[in-house]
Image (cartoon, rainbow, N blue to C red):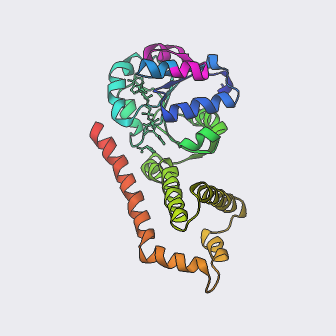
């Protein structure tokens, strides 16, 4: 069965859920084949009004959709499944977006043999530039992985990874956009320090970020080669690089991403 014939429920349609729902709508999914759930009445009303999708209870969503995407926070997943898990009819595909939680967490709370696929995506799904990393649980077949990829491909790139790599993927790619936003904030402040108007500084950095990303993707060159091309002997860039090196920014990046990976592990350990 192709993605085009499915009904998909976003169980817990928050920031990531909204990114995925809106991407599927842009890709041509009819709102009638999309279902959303949320806890707060105002959120439910917003989803219905903004996207025209059907907003149902979790149990109704599980009954009516054949693909259930779990978009609640990892800390809320156990509570959700305590109620919903045993009521999920057989034959449904469960796709989890939850950071840290292994597929076994879901499998033990769902009817036996329910296929579970773990996905780590990111918010650039809102502009069809996500990276979605996909891993099969123990009852998910190659067809389930293919279907998941088909569902997510309109939102950006997809990649299959062993589940053992998902916490690292989460630290690098799930959280990754936040690191770039952080850098953009800091670089914009630097522009202000040097006397540029905030908007001019912002526009310069965003275009530099976009240009650098496109060059990384399209040139196929190693980042060191691209950086060397910018770094003139005795020029300006090397003065900045010297400061980054003396502040041990590379070591801070390694520590930061390792901390994110460790936090993903803690989240899983805290809910079992
Ligand atoms: N944000 C990101 O960049 C990324 C997030 N993720 C993962 O995606 C998941 C969602 O994150 P995010 O979108 O940021 O979180 P949000 O808090 O924005 O969204 C979670 C949603 O789940 C709803 N919810 C919680 N409990 C229930 C329930 N029992 N029944 C129905 N709905 C429920 C909430 O409803 P209400 O709004 O009414 O409270 C909310 O809309 C997380 O597991 C996270 O690890 C993965 C990659 C990137
Ligand atoms: O910060 C978080 O926990 C989520 C998962 C990856 C990105 N955001």
Q: Position of residue 36 (x, y in %)?
A: 52, 22
**In this image, 161 relative to 73: left or right?**
right
Can residue 46 be seen here? The reply is: yes
Q: Is residue 50 in the magenta section?
A: yes
Q: Quadrant of ligand 1?
A: top left
Q: Which residue is at 54% across, 31% downward?
A: 18
On screen, residue 16 above or below 114: below
Quadrant (top left, top right, bottom left, bottom right) of the N terminus: top right
Left or right position of 209 against 269? right
The location of residue 7, given as percent across then percent down, is 59, 20
Specify the segment rendered in magenta: 46-65
Q: Position of residue 122 (x, y in %)?
A: 53, 43
x and y, in percent, of residue 113 in the image: 44, 26
Q: Residue 199 appears in which quarter of the rendering?
A: bottom right
Q: Look at 69% across and 64% down and name the residue there.
A: 220
- Toward which corner of the image does residue 41 lie, by quadrant? top left
Q: Nearer the viewer, residue 139 or 30?
A: 30
Q: Is residue 2 visible?
A: no
Q: Is residue 133 above or below residue 41?
A: below
Q: Residue at x 43, y 78 (%)?
A: 246
Answer with the quarter of the image where residue 219 lies: bottom right
**Residue at the limit of the structure toward the bottom, as seen here:** 234
Q: Which quadrant of the rendered structure holds the C terminus? A: top left
């Amino acid at each position: 069965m192709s993605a085009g014939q499915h009904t998909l429920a976003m169980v817990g349609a928050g920031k990531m859920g909204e990114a995925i729902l809106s991407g599927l709508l842009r890709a041509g999914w009819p709102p009638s084949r999309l279902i959303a759930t949320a806890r707060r009445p105002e959120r439910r009303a917003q989803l219905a009004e903004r996207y025209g999708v059907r907003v149902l209870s979790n149990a109704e969503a599980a009954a009516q959709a054949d693909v259930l995407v779990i978009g609640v926070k990892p800390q809320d997943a156990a509570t959700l499944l305590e109620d919903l898990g045993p009521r999920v009819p057989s034959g449904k595909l469960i796709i989890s977006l939850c950071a840290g939680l292994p597929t076994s967490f879901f499998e033990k709370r769902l009817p036996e043999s329910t296929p579970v696929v773990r996905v780590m995506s990111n918010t650039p799904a809102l502009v069809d530039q996500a990276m979605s990393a996909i891993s099969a649980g123990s009852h998910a077949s190659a067809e389930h992985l293919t279907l998941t990829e088909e569902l997510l491909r309109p939102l950006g790139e997809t990649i299959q990874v062993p589940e053992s790599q998902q916490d690292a993927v989460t630290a690098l790619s799930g959280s990754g956009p936040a690191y770039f936003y952080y850098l953009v904030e800091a670089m914009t402040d630097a522009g202000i320090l040097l006397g540029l108007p905030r908007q001019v500084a912002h526009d310069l950095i965003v275009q530099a970020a976009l240009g650098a990303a496109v060059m990384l993707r399209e040139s196929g060159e190693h980042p060191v080669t691209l950086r060397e091309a910018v770094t003139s002997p005795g020029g300006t860039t090397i003065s900045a690089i010297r400061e980054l090196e003396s502040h041990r920014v590379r070591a801070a990046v390694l520590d930061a991403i390792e901390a994110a990976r460790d936090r993903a592990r803690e989240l899983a350990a805290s809910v079992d």
